[in-house]
Amino acid sequence: MELAEAKLKFIEAWGKLGSEWGINRTMAQVHALLLVTPGELTTEEIMAELSISRGNANMTLRDLISWGLVEKKHRAGERKEYFYADKDTWNIARQVAKERRKRELDPVLKVLDELTKVKGDNKDPEYKTFNKSVTDINKLAKNVDKTLETMFKAEESWFWGSILKVFK
Amino acid sequence: MELAEAKLKFIEAWGKLGSEWGINRTMAQVHALLLVTPGELTTEEIMAELSISRGNANMTLRDLISWGLVEKKHRAGERKEYFYADKDTWNIARQVAKERRKRELDPVLKVLDELTKVKGDNKDPEYKTFNKSVTDINKLAKNVDKTLETMFKAEESWFWGSILKVFK
DNA sequence: ATAAACTTTCAATAAGTTTTGAAAGTTTAA
DNA sequence: TTAAACTTTCAAAACTTATTGAAAGTTTAT
């Protein structure tokens, strides 16, 4: 397979995975493009490479920057802005996990905490079932939360070393 | 808070989380409804409770069954079909992880494996960057895959015990 | 101050996804 | 076999989300 073809396949696969996990397809594709690009790209280049509009490119790049995955670079004496992606996979994974926890897991944990406090009669099967499900899910979610917290602080090698050692 | 209100909040929160993670909102809501319901519900009851159409209820229930989260029950002498959800949170988490791995992670791993095999000149920055990114992501994805594999086989208490022990 | 070079915004539109509901299909009991 | 009770299907409609592109805004050099 040729390099150019391989790049396209990578961009496509990454875009598809993103969209299946609730991340805008274009955002994932722009990110993929920057990941396989040495150095930086301008908005124009990204627009051309992926055949997307100026508006779309601009908004997607802002999103990627707000997710902490991409940075703007400024070259002395030039007006254009250059974009480049952090290529460290472990940082990327951490960054994505961090953002999604903040945006999605945290609010759910708040609701679950509130719902575990709802009082009722344990003789009532309606209440009992509700309470058990909510409490169990809350516990699971909190464990996930703790593990993510550890992951944020950890070095990649230490993290996987620890996990894979335990699971052998 | 009242039980009825709490149930609605739970159904809403679960639906929202689902949609943010690429799971149809209605599917997550029906699942949530069954989770807080002792015993079984009929299609009619689910339609009424969530104000959804017969077609929607039917398709969503089939999906939930194909995900292994819900089962049909048959009561002797009755024509109606009853649906109930497995209430074991650990089973649910495993089941969801299993399905998503099969549907989404596996195909990406296949593409990544193929892309890591693309040959090129390591003096070429284009090739070098492509190869490094793809190889790194492939490694990470394989580690995730291994961890999921362990999770599928494990008991909940053992799994979290091991993870949380390591991370203390 | 001006104008060229570039970035950002956002209303309109397109694309994608979910939902409906009526019709077709199936099963069961008599 | 018939018909009532129930389930399934799927084309059309509603809804949601993503994208465009032209206009407005900003920055920089002169």
Image (cartoon, coloured by chain):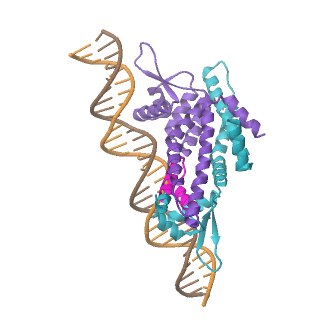
Chain colours: A purple, B cyan, C orange, D brown
Chain part drawn in magenta? B8-36
- Which of the two residues, B3 or B119, is positioned nearer the viewer here? B3
Q: Residue A161 sits in which quadrant?
A: top right
- Which of the two residues, B153 or A32, is positioned nearer the viewer here? B153
Magenta segment main secondary structure: helix
Residue B79 horizontal/vertical position (percent): 60, 77
In this view, the residue farthest toward the right is A168
Residue A9 horizontal/vertical position (percent): 60, 36
Residue C25 horizontal/vertical position (percent): 58, 73
- Which of the two residues, A125 or A30, is positioned nearer the viewer here? A125
How many circles with numbers are drawn on the protein?
0
Q: Is residue B142 visible?
A: no
Left or right: where A6 falls relative to C1: right
Residue B123 horizontal/vertical position (percent): 66, 18
Name the residue at 63% across, 39% down.
A147
State yes or no: residue A104 in magenta: no
Q: Is residue A54 visible?
A: yes
Quarter of the image with the C terminus of chain B is top right
- Which of the two residues, B3 or A23, is positioned nearer the viewer here? B3
State yes or no: residue B31 in magenta: yes
From what the image shows, is residue A133 above or below residue B139? below
Name the residue at 63% across, 20% down.
B124
